[in-house]
Image: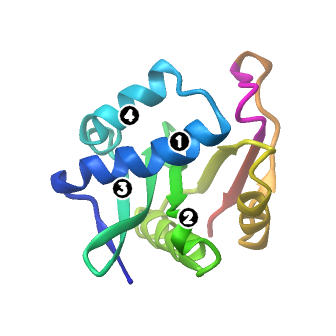
């Protein structure tokens, strides 16, 4: 298993991996559809990063880091193929995010998740993420858990 920086040939895998889990638990809104249709333009062009997990050359996981105005990053679009869940790949993807954020001297990592994603929430807590309050105007019923991890 290796985790690599996103390349244009990963676009289809990024979209299909994310659609698989999102459609199982949530509704894809217009903003999310834009990200999945154009990850380079929506994530990377804004100063973000995308990492792809490959096993035998096949994409089995991914995560996006969106650049935030304060210099931090939002973790989003993180998923692991059903066949690889429980393998530690989610933790490895998060560790790659920590490394990238630290190298960029980011003050924090932020994420929004759904309370229906109990295994993911447990992973986030185990890796130092703490709940934070969201502004009422930013409420999203699907992604009702907001967390962050401050970085040194």
Disc 3/disc 1 C-alpha distance (Å): 19 Å
What label sits on residue 82 in the rendered view? 2
What label sits on residue 58 in the rendered view? none
Q: Position of residue 129 (x, y in %)?
A: 74, 61
Label 3: few (<14), some (14–19) or many (≥20) C-alpha neighbours in 10 Å: many
The outermost residue toward the top is 137
Q: Is residue 141 above or below residue 126?
A: above
Compared across the picture, whether 35 is left or right of 142 comes to: left
> Would residue 25 be counted in the magenta stretch?
no
Disc 1/disc 4 C-alpha distance (Å): 21 Å
- Which residue occupies 30% across, 70% down? 58
- Which residue occupies 59% across, 80% down? 88
Q: Badge 4 is on which residue?
A: 35
Report the span colored magenta.
Answer: 138-145
**Of circles 1 and 2, which is in front?**
2
Compared across the picture, whether 80 is left or right of 37 comes to: right
Q: Earlier in the sequence, mark 3 or mark 1?
A: 3
Q: Badge 3 is on which residue?
A: 50
> Would residue 144 be counted in the magenta stretch?
yes
Q: Position of residue 6 (x, y in %)?
A: 27, 59
Image quadrant for the N terminus? Answer: bottom left
């Amino acid at each position: 298993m290796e985790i690599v920086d996103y390349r244009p040939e990963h676009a289809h895998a990024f979209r299909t991996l994310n659609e698989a889990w999102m459609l199982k638990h949530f509704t894809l809104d217009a903003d999310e559809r834009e990200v999945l249709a154009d990850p380079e333009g929506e994530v990377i062009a804004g100063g973000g990063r995308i990492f792809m997990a490959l096993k035998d050359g096949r994409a089995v996981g991914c995560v996006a880091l969106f650049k935030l105005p304060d210099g931090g990053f939002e973790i989003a679009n993180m998923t692991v193929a059903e066949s690889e869940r429980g393998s530690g790949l989610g933790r490895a993807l998060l560790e790659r995010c920590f490394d990238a954020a630290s190298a960029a001297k980011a003050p924090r990592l932020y994420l929004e998740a759904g309370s229906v994603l109990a295994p993911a929430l447990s992973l986030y807590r185990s890796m130092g993420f703490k709940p934070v309050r969201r502004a009422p105007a930013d409420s999203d019923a699907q992604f009702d858990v907001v967390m962050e991890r401050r970085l040194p």
